[in-house]
Amino acid sequence: MLERTDPPPPSADIDAAISGQTHGRLAGLVRQEAFWVFVAAVLACLALSVATDTFATPQNLFNVTRNFAFVAIVALGMTVVIISGGIDLSVGSVLCLSAMVLAISMNAGHSLVVASILALAASLAVGLVNGVLIAFLRIPPFVVTLGMLSIARSIAMVLSGNKMIFQFGPDESLLFTLGGGSTLGIAHPVVALVLFAAVTAFMLKWTRWGTHVFAIGANEKAAVRTGVAVRSTKISVYLFSALMAGLAGILEAGWLGGVTTNLGQSMELSVIAATVIGGANLLGGAGTVFGAVVGAALIEVIRNSLILLGISTFWQGAFVGSFILLAVALDRVRAYRESES
Amino acid sequence: MSALRLEAVSKEFGAIHAVNGVSLTLEPGQVMGLMGDNGAGKSTLVKLIAGNFRPTRGRIYLKDEEVTFHGPLDARRHGIEIVYQDLALCDNLTAAVNVFLGRELTRRIGPFQILDYAAMNRRAAELFKGLKSETRARDKVRSMSGGQRQAVAIARTRLSEPDIVLMDEPTAAISVRQVAEVLSLIRELRAHGIAVILISHRMPDVFAVADRIVVLRRGSKVADKAVADTSPEEVTGLITGAISHA
């Protein structure tokens, strides 16, 4: 860190104090990357509402929100992992494994509850292996979860014999309602997203666990020295990510009405994109739930707008990629300004 | 009653004698400057007191009671706090949360145990006031000056009402104005009856704040003098070996 060797003029302190007091809240909000992404998403929606008469229809909005809910739910877990300074590449495969275990169990006649418990247990097992290898053997998260990306999907293939499952036994209609239904015009995955997002935001802000996740991401050595249980916190972070992926898998199985082994393929990339666009720092220590959700929403709005405007969806990757680069570039500019001031 | 007493403490790593039969006594409210060249055994000695290492030979007494530490957290429970050279702060957290990191205050709401930010901010503000520092509890550490960061790290040690605070090169990487701030923080600790061991290379800082100076050379104690009875020249000679003992 650079330190100033001469004291700043006192007037600068006073000015800073005054401006900090007069518009601290607003300035704080404007500095948040997630806020600008939110503005971008809202502007995109407004532009689309004007440019097309198909965007602002209840049916399209219903579809858009439901489509991004799955990515956003997984992004909640990813946000926590990224705040802790890690990364979880296995989420797409975990989502697939969860959906597949659910499908196989229900196909074999088990109830939705039992099958969901089995599906989440399988997801958490993957998360536990990730966490233990990262926390105790100190293998880089990128490598561990890259391995699990391969292993989890492979297990899903072995379990299903790589066949599609579309019969879900006695609780079939219950599952389809859970994932594909809606309440008061809001798709159930969106309801789940709101619920999970609230819980995640609460845990990050108001629990010791949340503080420790931020501390580990910013300065792991400091966390160790101050007595934070770094290892168990790290394990819990990967468990949480796997749990979110597992829950999204159950919901997505219900929406699609069938599970194949390519479910969630390369989903980790959209999820990481959503998280980074929403302001999470891949170096750790920063990220918000709001940002992850808004980031996921923006990606889906882009995709949807390309379809509605009749532009080839092949352009989607270019747009999403540009947003990632823009978001990170803005973050760099901000960090540079902060270190200058 | 002394705050800390070492009796012929040694630490060997294989054939290397990092610390060799060091005895010393530290009274409550005393600031001891621990000086020596690189490799003289300063940091090993500090790690023995902080519980990172166990001595190969010799005894450590706290308040006249012999102790054996099982790791740094155990030493902390015995009233020994450390301010690390890098301060062990998290830039993304507020000053108050940094002070309480690992020991956060919580309150119960229904079945949930939630963080009590209000209480932490209040208590941290008291600690900063007690240290006569203008550090603000709610500000993030990222935006703080070197002196304010030191205040956060030192306030952290005050949480547990420690008897001894070990400070590793607190003035090594900060500006002149901030050095003055840190030295006054050390004086505040002394005023609260806390014994301070100050490891430093910077002669003027040690002479400005310490009551006593202990010099180590090649793992052995070669001097233990009141500041009034010595001079920077003599201490330099002791560190380099130009003067063998004093």
Image: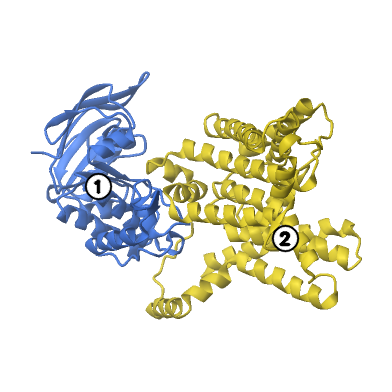
Query: Which of label 2 and label 1 is nearer to you?
Result: 2
Question: Residue lying farthest left?
Answer: B1
Give the colour chain A carries in the figure. yellow
Q: Position of residue B163 (x, y in %)?
A: 19, 44
In this picture, residue A140 sits left or right of residue A270: left
Q: Which residue is mark 2?
A: A65
What residue do we see at 65% from left, 54% from top? A275
Query: Number of labelled discs?
Result: 2
Q: Is residue B242 visible?
A: no
Report in which chain the residue with disc 2 lies: A
- Chain letter for the blue colouring in the rendering: B
Who is closer to the viewer here, A103 or B82?
A103
**What amino acid does circle 2 point to?**
Thr
Identify whether A197 is placed above or below A310.
above
Question: Rounded to the nearest whole Å, what is the CA distance between mark 2 and mark 1?
Answer: 50 Å
Task: From the top left corner, tell me how far across and down residue A246 is, in percent.
Answer: 65, 40
Q: Callout 1: few (<14), some (14-19), or many (20+) C-alpha neighbours within 10 Å?
A: some
Q: Which mark is residue B204?
A: none
Regarding mark 2 in the picture, which secondary structure is present there? Answer: helix
Q: Which residue is mark 1?
A: B160
Most distant residue in the top direction: B15
Quarter assignment of residue A51? bottom right
The crowd level at tag 2 (other Cα within 10 Å; few <14, some 14-19, many 20+) is many
The answer to whether one can see residue A239 in this image is yes
Q: Position of residue A302 (x, y in %)?
A: 79, 63
Asked if residue A203 lies left or right of residue A35, the reply is left
Residue B85: give x, y in percent of width and height: 37, 47
Vertical arrangement, residue B159 with respect to residue A127, above or below: below
Judged from the image, the secondary structure of the residue bearing numbered disc 1 is: loop
